[in-house]
Image (tube, rainbow, N blue to C red):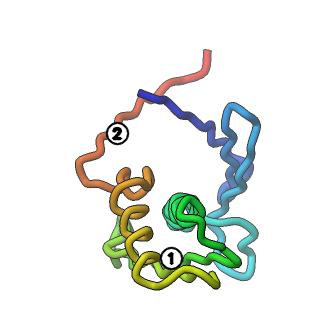
Amino acid sequence: MSKRNVTVRMKADYEYEAVNPQGNVVQIDMYDAPEKSAQSPMDLLLSALGSCAAVDAVLMMKKKRKTVDSFTVDVEGIRNDGVPAFYTDIHLSFTLVSPDANEVEFGKVVALSVDKYCSVASSLNPKITYSYLVKKPE
């Protein structure tokens, strides 16, 4: 089993940053437009899902020796009206520009990417568990 971790630090009431052990930083904010300057945690979830599926799909197309001129994933999440405002539905729309790939093989690659290889999609499984600990600094 592989373990990953990030540390999330408050910068202001509605501003946070997440840092991984390698020092990569992601800015996060909970502002509404037009004050918004970073993605919210729920935006980041959609971004993580889309990018995870994209990487797998692109690599599989290249493994099939297909040219990838352009690749886009549009991810749309529909949220619950109550609290918590979790996603009830997520839709991914994949667009590949390639002179030598057809829609059928691209569809098979996308299905494999999302349903089998994407760790983020698998992490959205309702069987996932989590725990938490509350501590005071020493």
Q: Position of residue 107 (x, y in %)?
A: 41, 77
**Of pointers 2 and 1, the one earlier in the residue sequence:** 1
Tell me: residue 75, above or below residue 40: below
Of circles 2 and 1, the one toward us is 1
**In the foreground, 115 or 88:** 115
Local SS, label 1: strand
- Residue 3 visible (yes or no): yes
Q: Residue furthest top?
A: 138
Q: Position of residue 30 (x, y in %)?
A: 62, 65
Residue identified by numbered label 1: 75
Q: Position of residue 2 (x, y in %)?
A: 47, 29
Q: Which mark is residue 38?
A: none
Q: CA distance from mark 2 to mark 1?
A: 25 Å
Q: In the figure, residue 40 lies in which quadrant?
A: bottom right
- Compared across the picture, whether 11 is left or right of 129 comes to right
Q: Which mark is residue 130?
A: 2
Q: In the figure, residue 70 lies in which quadrant?
A: bottom right
- Compared across the picture, whether 24 is left or right of 136 comes to right
* Dot 2 and dot 1 residues touching (CB under 8 Å): no
For badge 2, the amino acid type reads Tyr
Residue at 25%, 54% (x, y): give it: 126
**In the foreground, 136 or 22:** 22
Local SS, label 2: loop
Looking at the rendered image, the quarter that the N terminus falls into is top left
Looking at the rendered structure, the number of numbered marks drawn on it comes to: 2
Tell me: residue 127, above or below residue 48: above
